[in-house]
Image (cartoon, grey):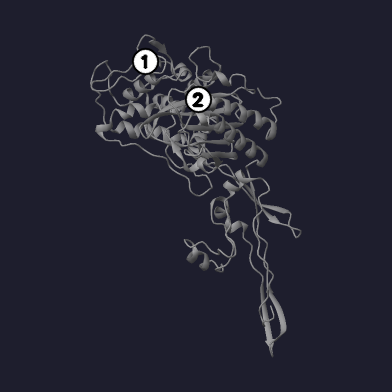
Amino acid sequence: ASMPGIKVGTSWSRNYPNGESVKTVIGTVTSEKQGLPSDQINSLLAQGYSRDDSVGSSYIESQYENVLKGTKSVTTLETQNNKITREIKTYGGKKGDNVVLTINAEFQQKVQDIMKSAVESVGSSNPDLPGAYAVVMNPNTGGIYALAGVSRNLETGKVSENALGAINQSFVMGSVVKGATVMGGLMSGAISTENNTLVDEPIKLQGTATKSSWFNSSGSNNMSLTASNALMVSSNSYMMQLAMKEGGFNYSSGSALSMSTSIFSKLRGFFNQFGLGVKTGIDIPGESTGYEGPSTQANIGKALDLSFGNYDSYTTIQLAQYISTIANGGYRLQPHVLQSIHGTNKDGTLGQTKAEFSPNVLNVVSANQSQWDVVKTGLWRVVHGSSTYRTGGTMSSVKPAVAAKTGTAQTYHGETPTETLSAVSYAPTKNPQVVVALVFPGMADSTTSHVNTQAVSSIYSAFWKYVQSSDGLD
């Protein structure tokens, strides 16, 4: 400090008063010692940064670094005989702006606690469970209320925070996708709103093991199903028959499956319109696209698995965007955590609004109202229908009333058969205000657990308590 022209300054570090789960989503800032991230150093130097500057190095901190950073003051010093004779501030500097997030900090922590407790409660009986993830989102704006998740060490059983797994971990999700399958069938003309009854029966194809619905593996429980009721009871047979119709294959028991591989792109094309299998555009770096299985003629039978959600893998944020698109009637909205940008007052408090995030429609599913009614009626019946085979009855007591689709995917951990339990939902059913999507991969094979629907119910209870009042909603 005694050297001419040299002044000692202070450094700073981020404080995270809202806990680890929020910190996970917000990301990190480099320290003065770390300086600029090595993979960005040239571009940041070109923007005027110094090598020892602290910058956002991951997730939201990185995404909005250009907003959060201030500008340095510039002072010119004149010296004579090793003494400073003049000090002129040529630029006073500027405080960084503030980012206000859509995430509700208290609710975020509650959802994080719900997911952690759920994993801990079933972990001992599900040794291959690697964690669980949840997204809670506004279907009318795309705003994220909570992005939660945990990882579980398969060797020690230790559970740790991993909220970002909701956007960068993908899984085969199971029957939750069937709403998009039915809509694809309607939009392609394979079925119509007036004529959509098919018989649920085991699908028997030459050279292939029989594929069936969970309630009709032997064929002793064949039943006629409308599209809505096929969603209610989660009929695999119905979805496979839709795929074969869309592929131009006239099914008969024992025949050889003969379809063009274009069926893969046809099914995925409809899924993509809802956000399944494509990036959602969430404003956090590191989002995964998921995984597409091979689409060759040798894999043509897998198109049937794709139709009921047992082939491609998706992220939890994709599930949230998908169910939001159904809830709002066809608008695929970009999920976002930025709500607004504010200046900074002299005392450091939140200043005037400089920008607000406007809902960004990525595409529109051009179905008509009667087609949406078929799908939405099915999702209502999943929870509130009269059939003993409905799959979401454990959520029927949730108020305001929920519409939903559950999923059970047949998966493997190494050579050990496992199951993925998932769920997508929205509430209230008549005027959706919120969607909840979650996944518990790696559950034990043939599990009887309802951990997915129980977690959904707990999350809705917390939402109406901490985020929005349910008064006047039903």
Q: Is residue 81 above or below residue 226?
A: below
As rendered, which of 42 and 252 lies closer to the eye? Answer: 42
Above or below, 302 against 104 in this view is above
Residue corresponding to mark 1: 217
- Describe the element under mark 2 as helix, strand or loop: strand
Q: Residues within 10 Å of mark 2 (few under 14, many from 20)?
A: many
Is 116 above or below relative to 185?
below
2 or 1: mark nearer the eye: 1
Relative to 40, residue 471 above or below: above
Q: Is residue 411 visible?
A: yes
Residue drawn at x 37%, y 29% as measured from the top left: 306
Kindly identify which residue carries mark 2.
405
Q: Position of residue 155 (x, y in %)?
A: 47, 39
Give the mark, 2 or 1, whose residue is nearer the N terminus. Answer: 1
Outermost front residue:
156
Residue 175: where, in percent of width, then height? 44, 26
Say which amino acid is labelled 1.
Ser
Question: What residue sits 43% from the left and 40% below the top?
Answer: 278
